[in-house]
Structures are given as C-alpha cells and as structure tokens.
Image (cartoon, rainbow, N blue to C red):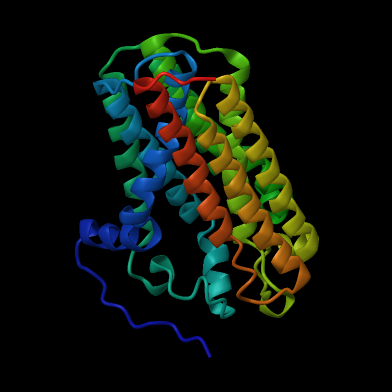
Amino acid sequence: MNEQQTVMVRPSRIGRLADYVNEMFPLRLRIPINLLNFAVIYFGLQALQGMPLTFTWMSLVGAITVQVLWLFIRVYDELKDAESDLALARAGDPRFMNRPLVTGKVKLADIAAFRWWLTIFVVAINIAFLNSALLVALLIGFGYLTLAYKWFFWPGMKDNIIIVFFTHIPNVLAIQLYTAGVFVAEFGWPQTTPALYLLLGLWMTVAAFEFSYKIRIPADETSLKTYSRVLGWRTATAGVIVFVSISAVAYFAFCRTAGLPSISQWIVTAAGIWTLFGCTLFLIGPTRARAQLTNYVGVYWYLAGLAVVGGSLFKSVVPVIS
C-alpha cells in the first residue's frame, strides 16, 4: 500500500523552491540533457554550414535560456495541473502522492513567484545583447510556452490528452527554434532542408519520450489519463515506434547531408533499433518492467544527440573523407 511521506517544510520561500527544483527538475539530470539539446541544434547547424565549432557569450546565454525554458515547462505544468495532481494524489496514484506541492513541501504561491523571477531573468539576459534576431527567437520560444500554459485560451482541451499532446509537444519545437535563432543571430541563416531534418530529429525524440512516459499495463492504470488508457497500450506503444522511427530517419538524413562521419549515422541507427527492440518486447509480453519504455527512449535521446554533437566536432577538426 502506498503511503504519503512525512516531510519537513522549510520556512523560507527560497528553501522551499530549492526542494521543489531538486525533486521535480533535478539539476544533475536536467542540465546535461538540456545542454545536449542545445548543442545538437547549435553545433549541428555550425557543422552543416562547414564552420569550425564556436562557442560565444551569446551562445552561453542561449544555453542558459534553454535550461530556463525547459524549467518553465515544469513550472507551468505545476501551476495549471495543481488541482488534478492533488486529486490524483488523494486517489492514491503513486506518481503524485509525494510530489512537493501535494505534501506541502512547496506552496502554489511559491511556484507562482518563481515563474515571475524566471521571466525577469530570462528576458534580462537576452535583451542585454540588443539583437533583434535573438529577441524574436525568445518571443517565439517563450511566447508559445506561455500560450500552452494558458491552454491557448481553451481550458476545455485539458480533458483530452491527445489534443493536449498535439498542442503542447510544439513546446519542444519552440525551444529548438529559439536555439536556431541564437545561431541565426550570430551566423545567419543555415541551409533550410537539412536544418529541418535536425529540428525534426530532436523534436520527435522528445515526442517519443513523452508518449512512453504515459504508458502503463492495464493493471496499473488509475484515474490519470495516460496514452495507454485512452488509446490502448498496443496503440500507444505503436506511437512510440512511429516517433522514434521518424526521429532516426531525420537524424540519419541530417548526418548524411551535413557530411558528418559515418559513425554518427550508425550510432543513430543502432540507438533507434535498440528502442524499437524494447517496444517489441513490451508488445510481445506486456509487464510492469517492460512498460518502462522511457529507459529505451532515454538511451536513444542521449546516443542520437551525442552522435550529432560528436560528429559535428569531428567534422570541425578532421577532414571527413567520403
């Protein structure tokens, strides 16, 4: 039987928010993956243009901004889903019972204040460059996330997980477009079609991870709307397969057109096959352990991203012989 933990609540807002970030956005995990997300787009576009890899003060601000924008997604989800999360916790859903907002470790007012602190910070560090391309990129990234937070002024959509998916997964694309905007602000426009391959590869990776996170075997379903509950676990798993396949093909196409070394293409292919293998195992014999498809998609996310970044670095320092 799942029981709610007894927690110590810190007296200061800063302390409560530190506990919140530590549990809901653990920096030891999120900083590496978000830096990788930034590097895939930023360095991938440099490799595409045949440039030596360059890291500047503007790109440093860009990398920090990407971290903050991903944190915004977490904070916005917390604010708009507070009531439903509390209801799921009361119903005994183990994924929600010990969340900081549920246990009182952090207050909703703390998270609301945190949102404004982050807004001031991210606008300030970007506006300091007085670069119109960078500010337009921030407007796209931050603007779309804010619209999603407001449910696009249609609160009724939150009752349909499929509509929520297709309206909120572009949050990721908006952050990628911000990263591309950092590149444009510094170096100009990249080649369009290969750049779209790169954006699609990372975007579909995150779509696959989001889908895989909300797949459970029938015995583990609760009142939480999961993709497996709404679509059926087989169809939901098929969705992961489709997203990973699109991602792998897009990454593969980018690696070839950008002239990255063959090893990058093979790593992407092998990582994709590994993920499809995990999905197949679950389809053949659905168990609680095999339902953890995020383990497979997470490996793909890292390996495919590292293949692009590593290949870009290799191309920058070593002539690639075709």
Residue located 38% across and 50% down the image: 30
Q: Is residue 156 left or right of residue 73?
A: right
Q: Is residue 174 left or right of residue 120?
A: right
Looking at the image, residue 140 lies above or below residue 70 = above
Tell me where residue 45 appears, x and y as whole percent: 47, 21
Q: Is residue 144 left or right of residue 312?
A: right
Tell me where residue 79 appears, x and y as whole percent: 47, 53
Q: Is residue 143 visible?
A: no
Residue located 39% across and 17% down the image: 134
Q: Is residue 113 left or right of residue 251?
A: left
Residue pushed farthest front? 321
Tell me where residue 142 appears, x and y as whole percent: 46, 31
Residue located 58% across and 64% down the image: 84
Q: Is residue 29 visible?
A: yes
Q: Number of labelled discs?
A: 0
Tell me where residue 204 appears, x and y as whole percent: 62, 40
For the residue pair 255 and 95, the one nearer the viewer reads as 255
The answer to which image quadrant residue 88 occupies is bottom right
Looking at the image, residue 225 lies above or below residue 167 = below
Residue located 54% across and 57% down the image: 81
For the residue pair 224 and 258, the one nearer the viewer reads as 258
